[in-house]
Amino acid sequence: MKENARFGRRRLLKTMAAGTAVGVAGCQGAPGSETDTGDGAGGGSGDVDVPSLTEFRGSGTLASGRPAPEGTSIQDLPDLSGDLNLYIGGGEGGIYYQFVEMLQEIYPEFNVLPSDAGSSSLAQTIVDEVEAGATEADVFWSIDASSLGFVANNDAYEPLPAEAVDPVPDSFRGSDNAWVGVAGRARSVPYNTNELSADDIPSKVAEFPDTDALQGSMGWAPSYGAFKSFVTAMRLTRGADATRQWLSSMQDAGTERFGNEYVVSQQVADGALSAGFANHYYAMRVKNQRPDAPIDLAFTEGDAGALVNVAGALAVKGTEKQDLVSNFVRHLLSAEAQEFFATVSFAYPMIPGVQPVGGLPTVDELSPPDIDLAELSDIEPTLELMRDAGVLG
């Protein structure tokens, strides 16, 4: 990814102004566009009724006034047909499975048999089943790259074909096309605009403990999985000792502990905190519910504080449904799916033709650390140093 300009990191959250609609590439009429015929006809092998684009879009301030997405439309993909065993890791409170249900409504001959549990638990189950020669799942849809990396590192995957993963940048794919990202989330610093300006937020997370404006006014959720991935990224880039010292210094600076990052973002918007650590979409959810809330986002540069993690999909080793799996993944990366993830869960889209919501910098304007996301699966040393620092009980 290219290094972002300073303005990208400081860009204000704002409702995107209505733009000129651009058609979904390859369609005679993009769903929801002026040329949409509404009959759902396209490149599929059967007659399916693809809903208009508005059916894939979320509601609220941040979803309004958006240009139509570019990319491959569901209309131009082969029909989904058959039974698919899906291990799905939570999925942002069920949001991901909502899209699966939409696909089942579009394709009457497509049936998903889901197993829903934590991503890390499902990853271990997949490895155990593959090693026992008793594969149950066809697809693993994880909420984070660490669980995908665990499965890949244990050789429990089938490589995805290039046609399925090519729309996604290399940095959001596993080596050997072991997995592919379908929705992204960026680490960020939500801050209260009544208390701080963007210039009060350092560009490096290492500077936070010694920044006067942040003393006794920040919040975090150290038991949260996303925070542990952030600390893992810091450990990989700066070493265990420096990471342990940073955690201790942040505690000494009076950082307040909360149960999850949505609460941290709400506390920032309420003025109870001046700033915090959270995935970007929690502030977006606050803004969507409370458009006038005094909350904005800053992004650090080139360090763990700028980590971009992904939810992604992987074909499980031993599946006999490689074509169906590939087609399913292509549907997750369709223009409609990416618009759904961007406007319903406020995730970062993985294809360039779909914009993030609310004036966020695009993925290529962010400056994440140069690490292999699969390495985030090495969590045990992180938990040990977090306990040593007194951050975890």
Image (cartoon, rainbow, N blue to C red):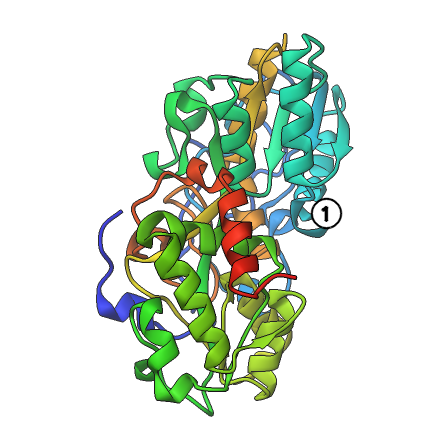
Up the image or down, 369 lies above or below 139; here it is: below
Tell me: 321 left or right of 218. right
Q: Quadrant of residue 83?
A: top right
Q: Secondary structure at mark 1?
A: helix
Residue 186, by quadrant, is bottom left
180 relative to 265 in the view: left or right = left
**The one of 80 and 231 positioned closer to us in this rendering:** 231
Give whichever of 227, 191 is nearer the camera: 227
Q: Position of residue 382 (x, y in %)?
A: 50, 50
Instruction: Residue 240 in the image: state x and y as whole percent.
Output: 39, 53
Q: Residue at x 68, y 32 (%)?
A: 122
* Total count of labels: 1
Along the viewing direction, whichever of 104 and 387 lies nearer the viewer = 387
Classify 10 Å Cα crowding around label 1: few (below 14), some (14-19), many (20 and above).
few
The C terminus appears in which quarter of the rendering? bottom right
Farthest bottom residue in view: 194
Residue 229 horizontal/vertical position (percent): 50, 51
Residue at the spot x=47%, y=37% of the render? 181
**Residue 370 shows in this picture:** yes
Closer to us: 24 or 374: 374
Q: Residue at x 44, y 86 (%)?
A: 215
Residue 176 position within the rendered picture, expressed as x and y whole percent measured from the top left: 38, 20
Residue farthest along the front direction in this orientation? 388
Name which residue type carries label 1: Gly
Q: Which residue is mark 1?
A: 94
Q: Is residue 322 above or below residue 60?
A: above
Relative height, residue 24 to residue 307 (above, below): above
Whether residue 347 is visible, yes or no, is: no
151 relative to 349, above or below: above
- Which residue is located at x 51 percent, y 27 percent? 330
